[in-house]
Image (tube, grey):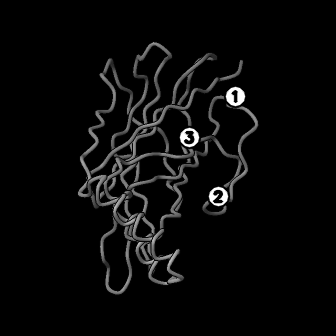
Amino acid sequence: MGICRRSVFAAAGLAAGLAVIPLAGAAVAGEIADHAVDAENLLQQDKPAEALDAFDKSTDAFWAASPLQLRTVLFADSVQGYGQYRPRSDSVFKVGDTATIYAEPFGYGFTASGDEFQATFKAGIEVTTPGGLVLAKSDDFGRLRWMGRTRSRAVHVAIDVELPDLRPGEYRLNVALTDDATGKASMATLPFTIAE
């Protein structure tokens, strides 16, 4: 997944925040459980290849039914790939610093592109006070895309945000991701401090 880099945003007045409406998945819990039971039974029958196929069907059904979730969301000092990041030791920044956000989305969809699959997300960023006053906002901060020959569930997102000119104090950085393939959306909030 590429890194999205942009300066922050147009100033915003009071706003209600980003609307996040999770969409219902196509699968139901019965389908998930049925395939999992099949996988366990096939393993007991010493049919590992068939068991793996059944387990994959269970996993696919669970993935499709899940809302978009962000399993890991944090400030990072560096990001090399999925699970390959160095967490930032604190969330204290200076005016003009760039904050790198690392996230692992779950429950996204794929679109076909030739003989490859892609996962694409729209990123939105918002800076607020702890009380919810919106200080800066960009609903379309950037687009992030991953491509591969299989439908990977190990896709990460890295976003670089140049922090706006803020007074010293406590703030919130809201990160919203919307999956292009499914329309599912999720938002996470990262508290941070601007140092004196």
Tag nearer the camera, 2 or 3: 2
Secondary element at tag 3: strand
Rendered residue at 72%/41% (across/down): 88
Label 2, label 1: how far apart the Cα atoms are = 23 Å
User: How many C-alpha atoms fall within 10 Å of the one at disc 1: few (<14), some, or many (≥20)?
Assistant: some
Q: What's the residue type where badge 2 is placed? A: Gly
Residue that badge 3 annotates: 162
Q: Please provide percent x and percent y for residue 167.
A: 59, 17
Secondary element at tag 2: loop
Q: Which mark is residue 161?
A: none
Residue that badge 2 annotates: 83
Label 3, label 1: how far apart the Cα atoms are = 14 Å
Please say if 165 is above or below 77: above
Residue 1 seen in render: no
Q: Please provide percent x and percent y for residue 25.
A: 26, 53
Query: Front-most of 85 and 124?
Result: 85
Q: What's the residue type where badge 1 is placed? A: Val
Q: Quadrant of the C terminus?
A: top right
Rendered residue at 39%/64% (across/down): 58
Tag nearer the camera, 2 or 1: 2
User: How many C-alpha atoms fall within 10 Å of the one at disc 2: few (<14), some, or many (≥20)?
Assistant: some
Please say if 109 is above or below 151: above
Label 2, label 3: how far apart the Cα atoms are = 23 Å
Residue 82 placement: quadrant: bottom right
Q: What's the residue type where badge 3 is placed? A: Glu
Residue that badge 1 annotates: 92
Query: Front-most of 42 and 77?
Result: 42
